[in-house]
Amino acid sequence: MSENQMVQKNDPNEVVVGGMTRGEVATLKQTLTPQGINDAQFNLFIQTCAASGLNPFMNHIYAIPYKGKMNIQISVEGIHFLARKHPEYITASGEVIGENEVENFEAELVDGEFKILKHKIALPLRGKAVAAYAIAKRKGAPDQVVFMDRSEVEHLEKGINPLWKSNFNDMFKKHVLKRALKAQFGVDIDDHTVEGSVDSVQDNARRMERKEISIEDGESIDEEDAKTALINEIKQDAGKFGFTDKQVNEIAQERFQQEINELSIQKLAALKKFVELEGQRSKAKVKEAETIEASFEEIKSTPTEAPVEQEKEQYGEAPPDMMSFEMDFDEDNPPFL
């Protein structure tokens, strides 16, 4: 084989599968293999990308190792990418409804079809998001509208993904938009889990320094980032009860015999509950002390002797002095004998 043929065979710009070049495939493998994806799982992921037309380099699709399996997740960007390829696609968008916008929001459900009649955005103070909706439009078809109340995504807001706490509005919009797009354009590609060689994946996972965690809506986060976000949240909660970082660490030592930075995500979640419990106890003690102090002040302010004016009414000009009074008697014949 000539040197020129060898160069062409190993050309990193050569498109080999699903529009991805040889170099891009190699980059993906170098990224995913140390995270716990074995060869069989990686090949399946590449074929899924090729068959769906989704590009992992554009955050359309993710391969996430978790407990010996590979979870393939499609992001809202991936769903929107596929919807835009539909010949009848017009547009699609999502929006949240702020608590200051409720009076200027109108929607109705007619014959099973949901319609947004009015939404006036209150700038600059929209208030806390109380709901969200998304509209997907296509030619020759009714608009597909998805409306969700905040209570319907509380499990996500309280979940492990810190993005639902730090970027709630954006995540809420993506959530409803993904549903509207899938319903309007019949995008049936969905997240799924692929079984793999457990031993191979676990061996690789043991060598990992940073692991990825599978979460809702095609998002993936680094475990260390999730731990950092949870620790910050614990410290914020502790601050509300007047606890210092040192005191929080002491609670971690007492409960788990570890420093807070050494705890796993599961232990951090438990620590959050312990801090809240200790805070409630501390709050109760302060309240009890305040009640006792208030009672003591009330006792001190209550008169223990009858006012002089009342005694004058009862005894005359001056009350009797039981400790000093005079009595005339004969010393030789005391009246008490």
Image (spheres, rainbow, N blue to C red):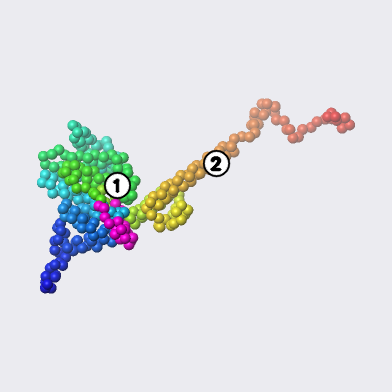
Q: Is residue 58 magenta?
A: no
What residue is drawn where x is 64% and y is 31%? 306
Please tell me which residue lies in front, 39 or 271: 39
What residue did someone put label 1 on? 168
Q: Is residue 281 above or below residue 256?
A: above
Q: Which residues are magenta?
A: 194-214
Residue 293's mark? 2
Q: Is residue 221 visible?
A: no
**Location of residue 294 (image quadrant):** top right
Looking at the image, residue 234 sits to the left or right of residue 164; the answer is: right
**Location of residue 35 (image quadrant):** bottom left
Residue that lies at the very extreme toward the right in this rendered image: 332
**Upstream in sequence: badge 1 or badge 2:** 1
Residue 6's mark? none
Q: Is residue 303 visible?
A: yes
Quadrant showing the N terminus: bottom left
Amino acid carrying label 2: it is: Glu
Please tell me which residue lies in front, 267 or 126: 267
What residue is drawn where x is 52% and y is 41%? 288
What residue is drawn where x is 16% and y is 43%? 186
Residue that lies at the very extreme toward the bottom in this rendered image: 3
Looking at the image, residue 188 sits to the left or right of residue 235; the answer is: left
**Location of residue 136 (image quadrant):** top left
- The number of numbered discs placed on residues in the rendered structure image is 2
Could you tell me residue 42's position as x and y percent? 23, 58
Mark 2 neighbour class, 10 Å CA radius: few under 14, some 14 to 19, many 20 or more: few
Amino acid carrying label 1: it is: Phe
Could you tell me residue 30's position as x and y percent? 24, 63
What residue is drawn where x is 21% and y is 55%? 45
Please tell me which residue lies in front, 93 or 329: 93
Could you tell me residue 49's position as x and y percent? 18, 54
Helix, strand or loop at mark 2: helix
